[in-house]
Image (cartoon, rainbow, N blue to C red):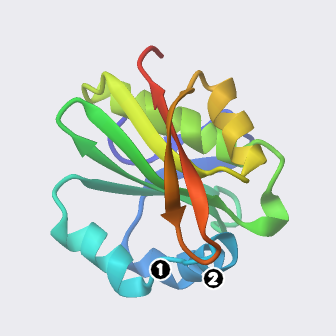
């Protein structure tokens, strides 16, 4: 799965994120999270972290950004950091396809474990991850700030 890939969602192409994508990524990030990553954080992941992998999902006909995923691949472990879809394109399968694609990429690159944290109140995300086979393994009390909230730790060991 090197380079650009076409997904099962019509007109959805997944490709590596570049610094040129950040002008489109930042507005999605800002509306998706209570404490969004800042541009320098994305730049550090793109340029300074050997474990980081960042991909965008785009409409292959209009080249419009639909969403993105950020994760770390550390030896045989995938740690999902950030998966976001443009608000006007949510609930049509883009997030699920991006998550499935990420898991497939990770498996092809030697992952045996996938892990993530999700806000306890984020029912839509928890349902998606459970649909993909993730299991709740722990709760991290007060992990998130603004608003203060617990994180649900989920793992996937077979996919």
Please give the name of the residue rendered at 78% of the width and 67% of the height, measured from the top-left corner: 87
Please give the name of the residue rendered at 41% of the width and 85% of the height, measured from the top-left corner: 39
Choose between 100 and 133: the one closer to the eye.
133
Choose between 130 and 23: the one closer to the eye.
130
Give x and y (percent) for residue 16: 39, 57
Q: Earlier in the sequence, mark 2 or mark 1?
A: 1
53 shown above or below 63: above
Question: How far is mark 2 from mark 1, CA to CA?
Answer: 9 Å
Q: Viewed as shown, does residue 122 lie left or right of 33?
A: right
Please give the name of the residue rendered at 27% of the width and 30% of the height, measured from the top-left corner: 109
Q: Viewed as shown, does residue 22 lie left or right of 44?
A: right
Give x and y (percent) for residue 77: 28, 34
Give x and y (percent) for residue 86: 72, 66
35 shown above or below 98: below
Question: Among all residues in the image, which is located at the extreme top?
Answer: 158
Q: Which residue is mark 2?
A: 27
Crowd band around label 1 with a 10 angstrom C-alpha radius: few (<14), some (14–19), many (20+): some
Q: Name which quarter of the figure residue 110 lies in.
A: top left
143 shown above or below 94: below
Q: Viewed as shown, does residue 116 lie left or right of 125?
A: left
Q: Viewed as shown, does residue 156 lie left or right of 18?
A: right
Q: Which residue is mark 1?
A: 22
Choose between 137 and 89: the one closer to the eye.
137
Please give the name of the residue rendered at 29% of the width and 27% of the height, measured from the top-left corner: 111
Badge 2 element: helix
């Amino acid at each position: 799965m090197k380079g650009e890939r076409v997904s099962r969602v019509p007109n959805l192409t997944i490709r590596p994120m570049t610094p040129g994508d950040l002008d489109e990524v930042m507005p999605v990030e800002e509306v998706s999270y209570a404490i969004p990553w800042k541009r320098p954080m994305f730049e550090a992941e793109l340029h300074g972290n050997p474990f980081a992998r960042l991909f965008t999902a785009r409409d292959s006909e209009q080249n419009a950004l639909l969403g993105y995923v950020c994760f770390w691949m550390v030896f045989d472990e995938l740690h999902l950091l950030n998966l976001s879809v443009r608000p006007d394109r949510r609930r049509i399968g883009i997030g699920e396809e991006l998550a499935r694609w990420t898991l497939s990429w990770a498996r092809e690159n030697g992952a045996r474990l996938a892990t993530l944290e999700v806000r306890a109140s984020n029912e839509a995300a928890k349902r998606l991850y459970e649909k993909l086979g993730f299991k709740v393994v722990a709760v991290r009390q007060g992990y998130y700030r603004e608003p203060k909230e617990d994180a649900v730790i989920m793992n996937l060991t077979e996919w």
